[in-house]
Every structure is written in C-alpha cells, then in structure tokens.
Image: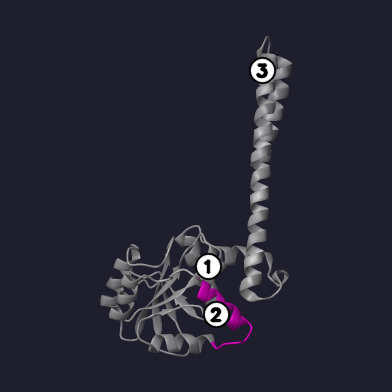
C-alpha cells in the first residue's frame, strides 16, 4: 500500500513538473518528493518493527519449547504470537479454537446458551466445558465483562457441563517476566471455588499443546482430571 502511494506521488510530481507553471512547477514536485521520503521512512520502520517482532517471538519460542525455533513453521509464529501476546479477544478465540481442534477435541458454538464462546467436549466421554476466552492486561480478575456471561452459564448449564476460563494474562510482558507475576486475583480465585470453575492461562495451554504433540502427556486425561477437580486455576509449572 505504501509503495503504491509512493508511485502515485512520483507520477504526480512528474505531471506537475511538465504541466504546472510558475512556483507550482517547483513546489509541487518538491512536496511530492518530501512526502515520498517520509512514506519511505514509515515503510522502513514498519519492516524493522516486523523483523524485531519475529526475532523476539523466535527467542520466546526457544525459551518455551527448549527446541530450535527453526522447527516451527512460518504460520506458527502468528499462532503463538496471538496465543501469548493477543491483539484482541476475537483473534485469541480463533487461535484457541484451532489449538483444541488440533488436539482432537470437539467444539461447537454453544448455540443453546448464548453465554459461552464455545462448548468444548472431551472425546469418548459425556464431559464438556463451557469455555470463555478472556484477555487481561495484568492478572485475571472478576472485572472482565464476560464474568456475567459465565455466571449466566452456571445457571443454565447441564449436569455434565463445567465452566472453563482460558485467560491470557500480562499480555504485554515477555514470558520470562510473567513467572514472577500473580496470574489470578483473589476475587477470581474465590469465584472459581464458589462456582466450581476451572481456569488455565494461554501460557499453560501452549505448554500442554506442545507436550501433547510430542507425546509427553495424554491431553484428554489432563482435561478429565481438571473436570473432576473442584474449581481452581491450573497454572504452568515451568
């Protein structure tokens, strides 16, 4: 897009130099050239920012997986970036949905409720979760607007269903700096216990996803245990 703008400015500068008279014949092309220079600087800054983002993401992936980042495909960068440093909840929900599908879970929009993002079903069982995906600039807490939807689901859910929060916390921090931060506020911890709600962070979901793909854990057994346990936050151990 910026390259197209530069091309249009160059053509207009040539047109002005050939057809305009007086001061306009010099000033208009000069203005176009200055604008082209500024547009070029913006494009250069965008490219450098994108390179820095990819370098940062590669470094974070290496720390998380303890494997060479070259083993990750190009499209995985977008997935991991959105999962751990999301720009908005809609994109985060799409990525979380894709990860659970990749792991073999069954998901549906939960049309009968209108109060959950997805219904997440554990294969070969009658157990399912009403899943809410939430973003937090700091620790997860009760102030998120979706908490009202969660309580509504608690009133409407069936016997074999349980609420699950997928929380992206401290979204602007590198993973290494999140370890020393509290992930779940006390008011939300109390709610989890009162309503028997489970919570996992997107960092933990990433860790589970990678371990399941490497065959280190049985992901379905993990979520069955989560379903059976009283409401609590399940946080990464590394």
Disc number placed over residue 27 in the picture, else none: 3
Q: Residue at coordinates 68% horizontally, 32% vertically from top-left?
A: 36
Q: CA distance from mark 3 to mark 2?
A: 62 Å
Q: Quadrant of residue 192?
A: bottom left
Identify the image quadrant of residue 54: bottom right
Q: Residue at x 65, y 53 (%)?
A: 50
Which residue lies at the image location 39% right of the left edge and 89% below the top edge?
Answer: 228
Q: Earlier in the sequence, mark 3 or mark 2?
A: 3
Say above or below: 6 vs 65: above
Instruction: Give the residue number, with chain letter if any, for mark 2.
Output: 208
Asked if residue 75 shows in the view, the reply is no
- Residue pointed to by mark 1: 95
Most common secondary structure along the magenta stretch: helix
Q: Position of residue 79 (x, y in %)?
A: 58, 66
**What residue lies at 49% left-to-right and 64% top-to-bottom?**
92
Total labels: the figure holds 3
Q: Secondary structure at mark 2?
A: helix
Q: Position of residue 238 (x, y in %)?
A: 55, 78
Q: Write down the region rendered in magenta.
A: 203-218
From what the image shows, is residue 174 above or below residue 208? above
Instruction: From the viewer's side, name the closer residue of 158 and 187.
Output: 187
């Amino acid at each position: 897009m910026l390259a197209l703008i530069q091309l249009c400015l160059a053509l207009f500068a040539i047109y002005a130099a050939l057809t305009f008279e007086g001061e306009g014949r010099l000033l208009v092309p000069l203005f176009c050239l200055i604008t082209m220079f500024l547009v070029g600087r913006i494009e250069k800054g965008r490219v450098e920012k994108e390179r820095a983002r990819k370098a940062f993401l590669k470094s974070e992936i290496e720390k998380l997986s303890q494997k060479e980042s070259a083993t990750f495909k190009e499209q995985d960068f977008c997935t991991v970036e959105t999962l751990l440093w999301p720009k908005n909840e809609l994109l985060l929900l799409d990525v979380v949905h894709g990860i659970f599908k990749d792991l073999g879970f069954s998901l549906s929009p939960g049309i009968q409720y209108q109060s959950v993002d997805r219904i997440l079903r554990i294969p070969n069982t009658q157990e399912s979760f009403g899943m809410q995906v939430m973003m937090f600039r700091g620790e997860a807490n009760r102030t998120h607007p979706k908490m009202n939807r969660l309580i509504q689901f608690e009133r409407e859910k069936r016997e074999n269903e349980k609420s699950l929060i997928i929380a992206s916390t401290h979204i602007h921090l590198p993973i290494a700096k999140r370890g020393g931060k509290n992930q779940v506020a006390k008011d939300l911890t109390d709610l989890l216990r009162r309503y028997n709600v489970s919570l996992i962070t997107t960092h933990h979901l990433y860790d589970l996803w990678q371990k399941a793909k490497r065959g280190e854990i049985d992901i379905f057994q993990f979520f069955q245990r989560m379903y059976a346990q009283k409401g609590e936050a399940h946080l990464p151990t590394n």
